[in-house]
Structures are given as structure tokens and as C-alpha cells.
Image (cartoon, rainbow, N blue to C red):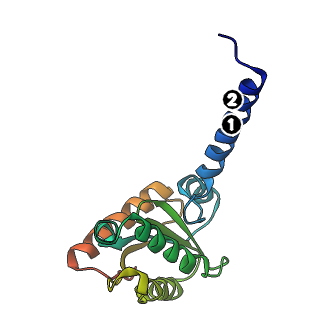
Amino acid sequence: MPLSLASRWAQRHYSGVHHWWRRRSDKRDWLTGLPGRKAFEADARRRAATHIAYINLDHFKAFNDELGMSIGDIALESVARHCKAIPRRAARVYRLGGNEFVLVTTEPKAETVALLSALREEIRQPNPQFGGLTMTATAGVVVIGPGEPWEEALERAFDRFEIERLAGTDRHNKP
């Protein structure tokens, strides 16, 4: 059965929109507006960063299970607002997906730790929409070695995060 002119136009139009959105979403997270995984991979290859931190929101599943996914989305958007408030010259935060974020910075150790502490403090602020639950974050931060591939640095940051998470929540190490 041949398609009508309108059907062919709609098919071509919407498939173009779909491909446009897919290309866009590779670079930017659709919910938070933060740069996404693909942007992180592209930036990591061309930037000379000194520190990388893997950040995970603690007990995020509780937000979705107890308060609903819409509140979980509000929580992620709230975290994104705090991340966007970090001066861009100092650091950049990417959302890898779910409740996983990565902070990449060219700042010295003391400033990196201060940025991460300030971000965790902002995330910890009470929000009446969270029904009394307090959001916290745990992070693992490492120094990126000269010439070290970003994949290895991120893996080391994740390993450091796991160590911190075993010791408790709402914390980060000092590289």
C-alpha cells in the first residue's frame, strides 16, 4: 500500500527529528542539561585536567521508591543546578547517567577538594519536596597522571569512590 504524501512527509520529518535528538542527547543529558557521557569522552581527550572525581548520589533509589520517579527527577535537576553554578573555568561536571556524575578540573589539589566539598554541601541542603529525606553524595577523587588515559583515571576514581562508600556515605577522599 503506497504512503500518502502527508505520511511520507511525517515519516521523513519525524525520523529527522529523532536523529537530531539522538545526536544532541549524546552530548547533553536531556533531564539535567549537563554535558553527558559523550561530551565527557570528547572533552577528556582534548583537555589537560589535573583531577577527576566520580560522584554518586547516596540512597538515590530511596527517592524513586519512596517519593516517586518525578521527585527523583527533581532531585537530579537540583543537583544539576548546583553543578552548573561551579565556575566553568574551575571545573566541569558531566552526568554519566542515573545518579552518576563526574567532575573534571584543572585546579590544584586544595581547590579541587574545596569545590567538591562545596558541591556536596549544596546537595545536602534540605528541600521540602523531598519529604524529609536528605540527599547526600559520596565521591572518589584522584590526580590524573601525566599522559594517563582518561578511562584509567575514571576507573581509579570509581575505585576510590567504592572505598569511600564502604567507609560510609556523604564523604570524599583527599587526593
Assess whether mark 1 and mark 2 are in contact (beta carbons under 8 angstroms): yes
Disc 1 residue type? Tyr
Q: Quadrant of residue 100?
A: bottom left
Can you tell which mark lies on residue 77? none
Which residue lies at the image location 70% right of the left edge and 17% below the top edge?
A: 3
Between 147 and 116, the residue placed more toward the observer is 116
Q: Quadrant of residue 31?
A: bottom right
Q: Is disc 1 surrounded by few (<14), some (14 to 19) or many (20+) residues within 10 Å?
A: few
The percent position of residue 110, horizontal first and vertical second, equals 49, 88
Which residue lies at the image location 65% right of the left edge and 45% below the top edge?
A: 23
SS at circle 1: helix
The percent position of residue 26, horizontal first and vertical second, equals 59, 49
If the image is split into quadrants, where does the N terminus sit? top right
Q: Is residue 38 above or below residue 174?
A: above
Q: Is disc 2 surrounded by few (<14), some (14 to 19) or many (20+) residues within 10 Å?
A: few
Q: Which residue is mark 2?
A: 11
Q: Quadrant of residue 19?
A: top right
In the picture, measured across the screen, residue 124 lies left or right of residue 111, that is left
Between 126 and 97, the residue placed more toward the observer is 126
SS at circle 2: helix
Between 40 and 79, the residue placed more toward the observer is 79
Disc 2 residue type? Gln
Q: Is residue 10 above or below residue 148?
A: above
The Cα atoms of the two marked residues, 2 and 1, are separated by 5 Å
If the image is split into quadrants, where does the C terminus sit? bottom left
Between 153 and 89, the residue placed more toward the observer is 89
Which residue lies at the image location 44% right of the left edge and 83% below the top edge?
A: 123
Q: Is residue 25 above or below residue 50?
A: above
The percent position of residue 105, horizontal first and vertical second, equals 56, 74
Can you tell which mark lies on residue 14? 1
In the picture, measured across the screen, residue 41 lies left or right of residue 137, that is right
